[in-house]
Amino acid sequence: MTSHGEGSLWRRPGETADAGKGRPKSARLVDPEDDMPSPTYTGDFETAAIPPYDPTGTRAAGTGYHPLPYAEPQANPGRVGVAIGGDTDADEPFRALDRRGTQDLGLLVLRLGLGVLLVAHGLRQLFGWWGGQGLADFKSSIAAAGYQHADILTYAAGGGQIAAGLLLVLGLFTPVAAAGALAYFINGVLTGISSHNEGRFGLFLPDGHEYHLMLIVVAVAIVLVGPGRYGLDGDRGWARRPFIGSIAALVLGFAGGVAMWVFLNGANPLG
């Protein structure tokens, strides 16, 4: 846009109409003095400079500066397109559990099978149900096998089987319950070798111990793998990812079974 000579209305404040007669017709609307840098010129980006962040929020009022909310740096900010602060891997352990398929169902069947068997066996020995021995005959058989304190062991063995079986069915304190069952089964094998096979180890029935050995394998498996999700222990970390506790329970089961035989029976099963 250019001026229009004498009739132009464009002039500086305080100028008269005659002041612009000598001005070239191509004079610009903006005064060249307006393009001069300010006394505090700091560079080409003077007007676009970004003020430093003030986390205290005490910047002087009236500056027109409103800082954006500060976001702490994230160790794992997530994938592109996900809001900062949202950890997309927070539910990964739960999604991994959901991918277990039928494993937890298999563990439930394993626990229920061994637990129900232990409960039924304990009730049969203590109360004579389903053609069992009953309390008196069970006590006599323990004494005949060479165990000391047969009166106490009668209640301990029968009650321990029932307690361990119920805990396995409920999935509560599963490694401890399976370790107790393991100790009982080990004594069953040692008693059978010492009493019935004259010190000879037989594997296959009717005189062998394949049944007791299979029960030992099942108990060891439950100790090592844990109860699965379908049990009262299912929400506990040590039950979902058993490691040190299961190894300790396994050692306790074997050591307890051997110690029970050594200190309460004392006989050499092989001779």
Image (spheres, rainbow, N blue to C red):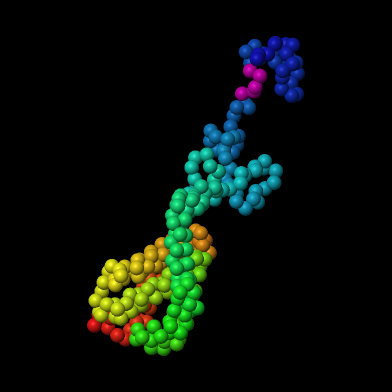
Q: Residue at x 59, y 29 (%)?
A: 36
Nearer to the camera, 106 or 8: 106
Nearer to the camera, 135 or 215: 135
Q: Residue furthest bottom?
A: 149
Residue 215 falls in which quadrant of the image?
Answer: bottom left
Answer left or right for 80 relative to 225: right
Residue 24 visible to the viewer: no
Whether residue 84 is situated above or below residue 21 in the rendered picture = below
**Residue 148, magenta (yes or no):** no
Whether residue 193 is situated above or below residue 53 in the rendered picture = below
For the C terminus, the image quarter is bottom left
Which region shows up in magenta? 28-32
Residue 132 falls in which quadrant of the image?
Answer: bottom left
Q: Residue at x 39, y 67 (%)?
A: 219
Query: x, y percentage for residue 34?
Result: 63, 27
Q: Residue at x 38, y 78 (%)?
A: 256
Nearer to the camera, 13 or 78: 78
Whether residue 94 is situated above or below residue 12 in the rendered picture = below
For the N terminus, the image quarter is top right
Query: x, y percentage for residue 236?
Result: 50, 63
Whether residue 254 is situated above or below residue 17 in the rendered picture = below
Q: How many marks?
A: 0
Residue 207 visible to the viewer: yes
Query: x, y percentage for residue 208?
Result: 29, 71
Secondary structure mostly taken by the magenta-highlighted segment of the chain:
loop
Q: Residue at x 57, y 40 (%)?
A: 50
Query: x, y percentage for residue 242?
Result: 42, 63
